[in-house]
Amino acid sequence: AQRYHDMLSRWFPRSEAGIRALYFSAQQDAYASQDLSGGTVFIFPGSSGTSGNYRNSEATRRAIAKYELLIKRAPKSIWATHARRELGEAYHAVGDYERAIPTLERSIADSEMKAVESTLLLARIYLDRGSSEKALELTSTEFNLVEVLARNAGRPVSKAELSEEALGRALTRFDRSIDVHMSSIRQKLGNLADGRSCIQTVIRKGYQLVVE
């Protein structure tokens, strides 16, 4: 598949098929560079696998070069929109925060579908750099809660599970701390374009991160 994608992208560099092939070729390099034994599961177009720990910097840099070329060739295509999220993550993987930050910010502006995961990574970068005031002003507990929801995007997560994973303690009978935190997070993240909150309450099941 990699050879086929590389061939198409060389022979038809500016065609829809060539741009698509370049995207998938870059994605294969990015996945090849990762240790998929752990990390964050993303369920979004263009990032429907697992984002693990990058181990192969050469493969990562190949992916970066291809994503950059794709965006240069077809900056307004849907494939460029998908590529920006992966490119931001790849920049982060090689420690290039100066390029990771604007790339992720553009990804957030371009695509509602990628906004949550790009925002999470951007917040992580700010936290890693000690700029906690820029990390969406999320508290560490709020960030942990959003991270748990992102790992389970598209399905409801119970309050008990959220309490165990994000707060590190069992949920007690009259404990409403999860609800209070979620209210704060919703205000900080804002709504989707259609007016809905990106975090939905699922009656008797918990909270769910919206996947478009």
Image (tube, rainbow, N blue to C red):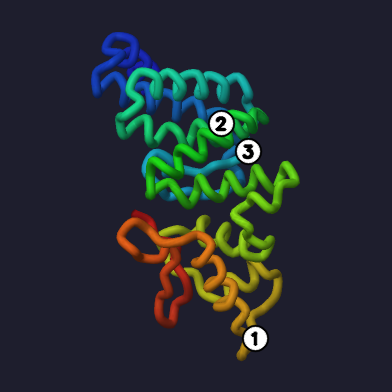
**Quarter-of-image position of residue 1:** top left
Mark-to-mark CA distance, 1 and 3: 35 Å
Furthest toward the bottom, the residue is 174
Give the image location of residue 42, x and y in percent: 47, 48
Q: Mark 3 points at which residue?
A: 53
**For numbered disc 2, what is the local secondary structure?**
helix
Three-letter amino acid code at disc 1? Thr
> Distance from label 3 to label 2 (Cα)?
11 Å
Q: Do the residues labelled 1 and 2 touch (CB within 8 Å)?
A: no
Identify the residue at image location x=50%, y=48%. 117
Residue picked out by circle 1: 172
Q: Residue 171's x, y, as percent?
A: 63, 81
Among the two numbered marks 1 and 2 on one chain, the one whose residue lies closer to the N terminus = 2
Q: Where is mark 2, residue-wise?
A: 90
Name the foreground residue: 90 vs 134: 134
Q: What residue type is labelled 3?
A: Asn
- Taking the spot 45% from the left edge, 44% from the top edge, the residue there is 108
Name the quadrant of the C terminus.
bottom left
**Label 2: how many Cα within 10 Å (few below 14, some 14–19, many 20+):** many
